[in-house]
Amino acid sequence: MISLILTLGIFFMDHTVFAQGADLPLVPRPESIKRGEGVFRFNANTELLFTDAKLGSEAGLFATLIEQLYGFRPVSKTAAASRPNSIYLSLDGNASLGNEGYRLTVSTGEVVIQARAAAGIFYGLQTLYQLMPAGKVISAEVPVVEIEDVPRFTWRGMHLDVCRHFFTKQEVFRYLDHLARYKMNRFHWHLTEDQGWRIEIKKYPRLQVVSAWRNGTRIGHYSESPERYDTIRYGGYYSQDDVREVVAYAAQRHIEVIPEIEMPGHALAALAAYPELSCTGGPFETGRTWGVFQDVFCTREETFSFLQDVLTEVCALFPGKYIHIGGDECPKDRWKSCPRCQARMKELGLADEHALQSWFVQRMEKFVATKGKRIIGWDEILEGGLAPDATVMSWRGYAGGMDAARQGHDVIMAPTAYCYLDYYQSNNPGEPLSIGGYLPIDMVYRFEPVPDALSASEGKYILGTQGNLWTEYIPNFRQVEYMALPRMIALAEVAWSPKAGKDFADFSRRLVSHMKLLDLLKVNYSKAICDVRLESLPLERSQLAVSLSSSYPSGQIRYSMDGKDPDLRSPLYERPIPIGQSAGVKAAMFDGGRRIGSVASQVYRLNRATASKVQLANPPAEEYANGGAFRLVDGVTGPIPWFGSDWLGFSGTDLDATIDLGVAQEIRRVAVDFLEDRGSWIWYPISVEVSVSQDGRNFTPVGSWTKETAGTVDRWCTIKFPPTAAQYVRIVARNAGVIPDGNAGAGRPAWLFADEIQAE
Ligand code: ACM
Ligand code: ZN
């Protein structure tokens, strides 16, 4: 995608360079497309015919989509055979189509969709819908085409956290519409949290009266201090009738709803209503801030009575196979000091609190099995031993999912680095406040749910993937759409389309054509795909070049260096721009004689270390490598809240960097920019040592810094020393190590994040 932009504009005009059918705005990409000559003319007289009365629902939903699009509603009815000017739905599909595949044949006289099951017909109709021109017409021209399509994965999911912020039933319907349009088939409904309990449980009315509400909400980012709060009472919940409506609405669209009832952690809202289910007895209030809370369900017997009652009502509401029991981020501090939990461990002969959590989850699994259902848990349920029949949702990277697959358990791969749609999708300073991280759409698209390291038989346990949308920083549904779309479409393609033929440039062309439909549906999707990315490249010692690129498949990039926003008179970007001294660059994408997307800008601060060669003793983690060691001397410092794109992240290991300044020179100051965001497991280093050398072999310490003497830390760590001649500078920053109890990610390796080293 990078830097092909100028030529793509030309390719875009010439259909011969596309793969067969790649110019059709179809997302996700079908397995096989054969284009023909001519068009089918869809008009108010076109009938929707189906052989089997049970396809009436699929036909009716399609008729409604057409009515929204064109203002006329096609007649839909059963028929024994197709007729001219009809869309004919038939369950006589080939066995190879499976339960979800379809064959769509558009000819000039009629359209036929064949499948084995109603789901396949539904997906065939979604494809047909995407082939319809977006915008009011009397007669819609649909290109003659033959499409055969079968999904790659059976689990194509989206999650929505309705606890941190609450979304109405109608908003959930609209979310489900988005899933259905892209052939996603699982809705993971995150219903209980520290900050709110959102499902009516008749036996426990205080869940509605107390747990569904909080007396205020954290303002700004979780890493900010001092903490700020509003005092607005906030909350809401879905009645059991609401839940039944959502489940039915989803089922019509071939989406299974998976409710998540969190245990043993993320339970503060429930404890606020029923403090007797905690280790300490409380009192508690429903959470007003984010993060991980120490108070969790106690392993006392009352907790199990409560959770079993809750799950009895939940299982009756959700006809699907799965119940998600959470299991993530459960601090063990309270259990360690609770006489009942300790007695429980002793009685069961359990080695530690992880084994206690494992026992907890296994007990719940047995109960859920009595209702004919299976549990899913976040990958923490691996710790202390997996429940025998559990499916693992791998979020803290691939490792948990790989481990589970090797143990013969089903897995849903949803690693944060590719599937967390609450992360920033653009480096643009105008982005709404987000939790952090950086996940642009091309990175979502690159995601491969089945790691190469798994054997073919282990890989079969990967059921698929899903996007997770946590809503601490997503206060309204417009922003849900903004964060979910279009990244969800990229993930839908990962989940549906064949692995072979994956091509981001091709995807982005289809997506941009498809966006006309999103505009028509008034979807508040992000236009980050139109953004320009600025990337510095080493030119020569102390000199940079800035390359500009975009995922947008046509148009021109223009830039300015005078501080003003670029306009149509600004220079056209043709090749990397040399930067000889500290400077700012602004850039934007232009198409059709106007700016599209927003203005990207970056300041470059040059110093003696800029563009030098850097050797790292330990590599950064793959997902936070960001192009490697050069990132540390690229003249750019990452913003706060952090986006990830400019940071190197080391998981549990030290930053150990040796910079070759090229020639010996006198230096007196080294500064390193570190990040601390403990909510995201990112800790400031505990010490930083600087040493210098003339030959690259013998190093002399010149200065150091330790956290003990420094008190609070805020990004730049500056170490000054008497002027010293050196060609090599070595910086060793010690990782904080294992995250202490009582913090997010306790017991896991801390991240060390650095983004820039300066020498003067
Ligand atoms: C999670 O993101 N805590 C599963
Ligand atoms: Zn306890």
Image (cartoon, rainbow, N blue to C red):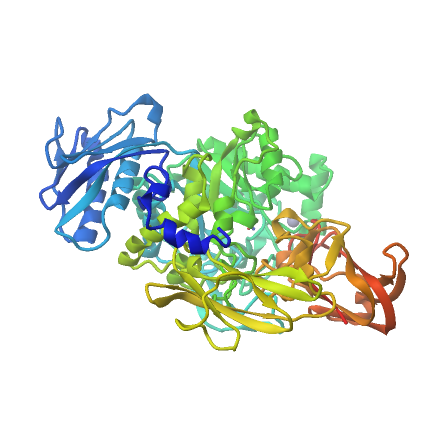
Image position of 54 (left or right of 1): left
Apparent side of residue 184 relative to residue 384 in the rendered image (left or right): left
Q: Foreground: 433 or 624?
A: 624
Q: Position of residue 163 (x, y in %)?
A: 46, 57
Position in image of residue 14 (x %, y %): 33, 47
Query: Where is 429 relative to 100, above or below?
Result: below
Q: Residue at x 42, y 60 (%)?
A: 530
**Residue at horizontal 47%, vertical 66%?**
432
Q: Nearer the viewer, residue 351 or 398?
A: 398
| Quarter in which the C terminus is drawn | bottom right
x%, y% of residue 613? 73, 57
Q: Which of the pair 156/283 is nearer the observer?
A: 156
The answer, for residue 489, to whether it is visible in the render is no
Residue at the spot x=69%, y=55% of the render? 629
Regarding residue 579, the answer to whether it shows in the image is: yes
Residue 201 position within the rendered picture, expressed as x and y whole percent measured from the top left: 42, 49
Left or right of residue 56, residue 309 in this image: right
- Up the image or down, 525 lies above or below 88; here it is below
The total number of labels drawn is 0
Which quarter of the figure has residue 253? top left
The part of the image, by quadrant, that contains residue 537 is: bottom right
